[in-house]
Image: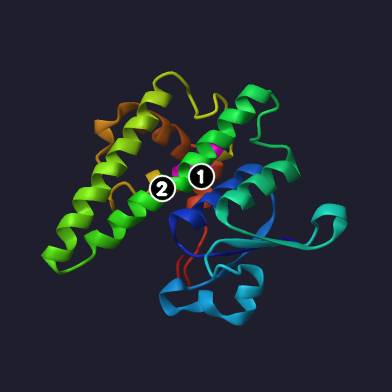
Amino acid sequence: MTIQLYAFDTPNGRKISVALEEMGLPYEVQVVDITKGEQNDPAFLKISPNNKIPAIIDPHGPGGAPISVFESGAILFYLAEKTGQFWPQDPVARVAAMEWLMFQMGGFGPMPGQVHHFIALQDETERRYGLKRFMAETRRLYGVMDRRLAQHAYFAGTLSIADFAILGWVWRHPRHEVDLADFPNVQRWYEALMARPAVARGFAVALRRGQP
């Protein structure tokens, strides 16, 4: 039996498909179409009580028993612990991986996500304040990342789940109207990751119905 990935074609969904591919874990996708409200289905709520994607069911969890996991950061941490991959053994690097994973979960996700919301509004009055506030904060976060990557190849020094978490959102940089050329270290990191075969497979897997 394989891991069941409940997801949609979003940054948070792509974090997990990339991680599963990089870790070499077999999985099957169960599309949860959030544009049609499928995240509110009672069966899905038993897996993800916050009615958000992604979520997984691992039929071979701790002790060999099935387990479901929701919240993308928790899923990444679970998979890293399960496989022993992309979770540094060095204690200092492990702290860095956790720091940058929390950085993504608490900031670099919520902030560009707000940009995605406000940029789609038609009413210019509604758009203006939200875009000014959240685009400024999004660019500040890119600056934080750029400074980190000026001194490190990856956020924790070595490739880790923190990179997969952040990658899902940098992938959407055109949507939140950030030119990666303004952040050359982020651009270098992004291009290097996107060139990895497993990352390419993670982004190619169909997370929408009808997607080739």
Q: Are marks 1 and 2 in contact (CB under 8 Å)?
A: yes
Q: Position of 97 compared to 136: left or right?
A: right
Residue neighbourhood size for the residue with mark 2, other residues' Cα within 10 Å, grouped as few (<14), some (14–19), many (≥20): many
**Residue 42 visible in the shown view:** yes
Query: Dividing the image into 4 quarters, which one contains the N terminus?
Result: bottom right
Where is mark 1, residue-wise? 165
Q: Is residue 166 covered in magenta?
A: yes
What is the three-letter code of the residue carrying label 1? Answer: Ala
Q: Is residue 210 above or below residue 13?
A: below
Give the image quarter of residue 4.
bottom right
Give the residue drawn at x 65%, y 45%: 77
Q: Is residue 60 covered in magenta?
A: no
Give the alpha-carbon distance from disc 1 to disc 2, as whole Å: 8 Å
Where is mark 2, residue-wise? 169
Give the residue drawn at x 29%, y 31%: 183
Q: Position of residue 198 (x, y in %)?
A: 56, 43
Give the image quarter of residue 58.
bottom right
Give the residue drawn at x 32%, y 56%: 114
Determine the secondary structure under disc 2. helix
Give the image quarter of residue 107.
top left
Span shown in magenta: 162-167
**Residue 204 visible in the shown view:** no
Which residue appears farthest toward the left when viewing the image?
124
Q: Position of residue 134 (x, y in %)?
A: 27, 49
